[in-house]
Amino acid sequence: MAMLLPGMAHAAEPTASGEFSSSDFTESDRCMQCHAILGTQWEGTMHSNAYVDPFYLEEFHAASEDTDGLVDSFCSRCHTPIGVVAGEIPPADGSQLSEIAKDGVQCDFCHTVSGSDGTGNAPFIVTPGDTKWGPFKDSNSAFHESEYLELHTRSEFCGMCHEVTHPVNGLLIDDTYPVWKNSSYAQEDVSCQDCHMTPGITGFEANPGRAGSGAPQRDHISLHSTVGGNAFVTGILGADKQRDMAIERLEKAATLDMDSPETATKGGNVTVGVSITNSGAGHNIPTGVSEIREMWLEVRAADAEGREIYAAGTTNANGGIISANTIYNNVLGDSEGKPTHSFWLAESVLSDNRIGPKETVVEEHAFTLPEDVVYPVNVEATLKYRSASQELIDHLFGEGVHEVPVIDMAEVSGAIYDPDSPPESRTQSQSSPGFTVFAAVAVLLIVYAYKKQ
Ligand code: HEC
Ligand code: HEC
Ligand code: HEC
Ligand code: HEC
Ligand code: HEC
């Protein structure tokens, strides 16, 4: 059934496989002759690498084999949309794919999307040709016709592909768009584009400039460096700029706070609470293929001489995570109820402890101070993220081929003192970086309110 999205004049059937030829689409290089800046932003993103991504290709070939080719056009519809509408895939080995189809989610594909039949599993309507649809109502170009489409300015545009349900059993596998839709961000009109296509990262920030050579100066031009948290594959592909931007984004997603006792006696038990708040992402952290992603807290306590008292969530030489309290992701179950990373085989959700937008979770870590402890005891907590477990990547590519980088998203620390020490000697202030942040935000708000007058 065709569903009418807000901002769409009409609904129609999604474009079928093989409806067009790849020569109906224009190479990104041609667009970049005038839209050079947007081009350098897009090149190296996971959109431009959505098909050639080696991690995707390994998983795609496994999925194709497991299902006797049943998922070939399903997976490809998002990862090489031109390949599908041009009928160049299947075959799954990619032997029939044109160069333009290997460009993944590219310029002319996104800008000849002329409508959509709702969100999820790529129900796009694409009309390749002279007209490029986009966010401007008054745009003129000598090379192409321009037309305004509200869809491009809305999260529903992204929601076409950033919502995946299992093609056979309907299990929701990637819930990025639906979670955003149910969050306060949707109510406050903070779209995917506001965070992912502006310099703001956690909200809209204007980027004044020109959309191309000969184009007029405008108050805002959307960035096309649409990055998420993928510092792994961007690194493999040598897209260092996008890798660094992904790290920066991960560093803005969450905030930590620590609740540790100011003093504790030698040989005494200590419980430290660490809270993790998803303060910056408009969806769960992690999201997307979160059954593959891993996020966890590393907590270490050491005395003044550096002797380790407690450690959780550290990694061993093989990249395994040791005694983490929780791994934040979702675990999918296969037909026998066994955990699987192969989401095409998934039939159920076994567990899901991802952290929702603006949600806070608290972990408790308990340990005993040694009798000969040297005060103060320093406690450090670091929120870690990686795109996949080292084990999965070793299994797919062979041991020692790719090291999955572990990114520090946020840190917090605290100190525990001798109860007999005079309070004024407890120099390392009882940590609350949260407080400084709140103070800074308050100051900013005051400045902002002042400026608005
Ligand atoms: C994933 C889909 C996608 C891809 C790929 C893409 N764009 Fe866009 N583009 C958008 C969306 C969405 C907007 C509007 C964003 C908004 O209004 O917030 C946009 C805006 C624009 C605009 C208007 C100016 C601006 O930046 O706001 C131009 C011009 C443009 N894109 C050209 C290009 C070119 C050239 C490429 C390839 C180098 C490209 N786009 C790749 C989705 C895409
Ligand atoms: C000969 C130069 C030139 C080429 C080549 C070119 N464009 Fe444009 N394009 C422009 C100019 C100039 C504008 C006007 C920008 C403005 O209004 O600020 C524009 C505007 C756009 C817009 C905004 C449309 C709207 O109404 O919001 C999109 C989207 C776009 N181009 C996409 C593309 C894509 C995709 C390609 C490649 C298939 C491409 N352009 C090739 C010059 C060009
Ligand atoms: C045609 C389908 C399609 C559309 C439309 C689309 N995307 Fe994507 N996007 C993908 C695919 C496929 C990938 C993953 C490629 C990969 O990792 O191999 C991706 C990757 C991403 C990533 C990088 C994720 C990471 O882990 O780093 C971000 C961020 C992203 N998209 C945001 C957006 C936003 C914002 C929009 C809307 C303006 C959008 N996408 C529209 C298909 C799409
Ligand atoms: C309030 C800002 C905000 C909004 C709104 C937002 N994002 Fe994000 N997004 C982030 C931040 C920060 C990250 C990095 C943390 C992470 O990886 O989850 C991120 C990461 C991602 C990732 C990588 C996921 C991962 O965990 O590896 C994808 C994909 C993505 N966003 C897509 C989207 C789409 C699609 C929408 C709209 C439905 C959207 N985002 C809305 C801020 C936002
Ligand atoms: C409806 C669109 C859609 C379909 C269908 C789809 N994907 Fe994706 N895929 C995405 C998006 C969007 C992302 C990025 C999410 C993220 O980064 O967390 C992604 C990311 C991935 C990744 C992670 C790549 C990386 O570099 O980390 C793999 C692997 C993957 N997809 C494999 C598949 C396979 C195999 C299939 C078919 C069984 C499939 N996808 C079907 C949209 C889709």
Image (cartoon, grey):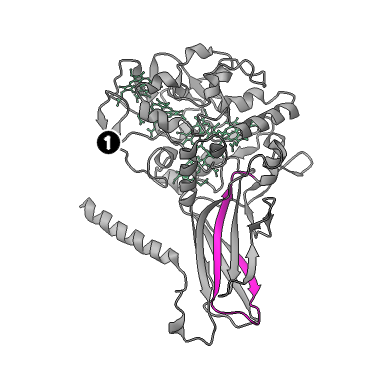
* Image coordinates for residue 442, horizontal then vertical, percent: 33, 61
Q: Quadrant of residue 190?
A: top left
When the figure is inspected, residue 269 is found, relative to residue 342, above or below; the finding is below
On the image, numbered disc 1 is attached to which residue? 219
Please give the name of the residue rendered at 46% of the width and 47% of the height, measured from the top-left corner.
248
- Residue range highlighted in magenta: 364-388
* Image coordinates for residue 23, horizontal then vertical, percent: 50, 12
> Any magenta on residue 378?
yes
Crowding at dot 1, Cα within 10 Å, few <14 / some 14-19 / many 20+, comes out as: few
Q: Quadrant of residue 69?
A: top right
When the figure is inspected, residue 446 is found, relative to residue 393, above or below; the finding is below
Please, what secondary structure does the residue beneath circle 1 have? loop
Main secondary structure type of the part rendered in magenta? strand
- Give the camera-side residue of 109 and 182: 109
Q: State whether residue 7 appears in this view.
A: no
When the figure is inspected, residue 308 is found, relative to residue 419, above or below; the finding is above
